[in-house]
Amino acid sequence: MFVDGREEVIEWDKEVKQLAKRLMRLLSEGLGLSRNRLLQMSCIERRLMVGQYYPHCPEPNKTVGITAHTDLETLTILLQDQCGGLQVNCHGKWIDVKPVHGALVISIGDTLQMICNDEYKSGEHRVFANCLSEPRVSVAVFFDPGISGIEYGPLPELVSQEKPALYQQVKFSDVLNKGLDTGLEGEGKYTINYFRL
């Protein structure tokens, strides 16, 4: 029997968009900025929803699901199933992100790290190949700037003599193109480091 999930996807898109706006307001306040500062920059105007399917892998020790990387975008909201497999790098040690029913995984992307001048850091993560008998499924929504001509970089309010700007002002399209050039080759934060001053 075929199940049409279009209505659910439309509803999820609406809800995740509202959640992203709330998160950006909280992140703005956490930086000591006005509540809507990050929203006014149009840095989450565009979004891409990606469904990821990891079938059973008979030899998971010989492959990787997704290699270590950081997300290029501003913000990522991930809905994962109960199978697990996601890991984050915490001070050089890989930690499992255990699925919690009803919970979402929120990840800062490279673009937001540049905008906030390293006050928030993008998280390096990877996904193991699925060794379980059932498939692993996750849905990620990547938020990025919607206006291609705008340059993003450290906000003037977060730059001082004591804390100078750490990144160039760049268009998101430049970040995206550099990320596509380097790919997911275990380079970690190579893309963001390319724009570091």
Image (cartoon, rainbow, N blue to C red):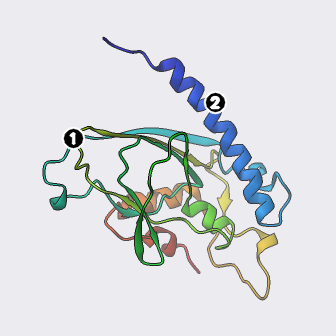
- Please state which amino acid type lies under the numbered disc 2: Lys
Crowd around label 1: few <14 · some 14–19 · many ≥20 (10 Å)? few
Taking the image as shown, residue 108 lies to the left or right of residue 155, namely left
Q: Is residue 103 above or below residue 154?
A: above
Q: For the point 42% across and 78% down, which residue is it?
A: 92
Q: For the point 55% across and 63% down, which residue is it?
A: 110
Mark 2, residue position: 14
In this rendered view, identify the residue nearer to me: 183 or 97.
97
Q: Quadrant of the N terminus?
A: top left
Considering the numbered disc 2 on the image, is that residue within a helix, a strand or a loop? helix
Q: For the point 51% across and 65% down, which residue is it?
A: 123
Q: Residue 35 carries which label?
A: none
- Please state which amino acid type lies under the numbered disc 1: Ser
Considering the numbered disc 1 on the image, is that residue within a helix, a strand or a loop? loop
Taking the image as shown, residue 151 lies to the left or right of residue 129, namely right
Whole-number angstrom distance, CA of label 1 to CA of label 2: 33 Å
The answer to which of marks 1 and 2 sits earlier in the sequence is 2
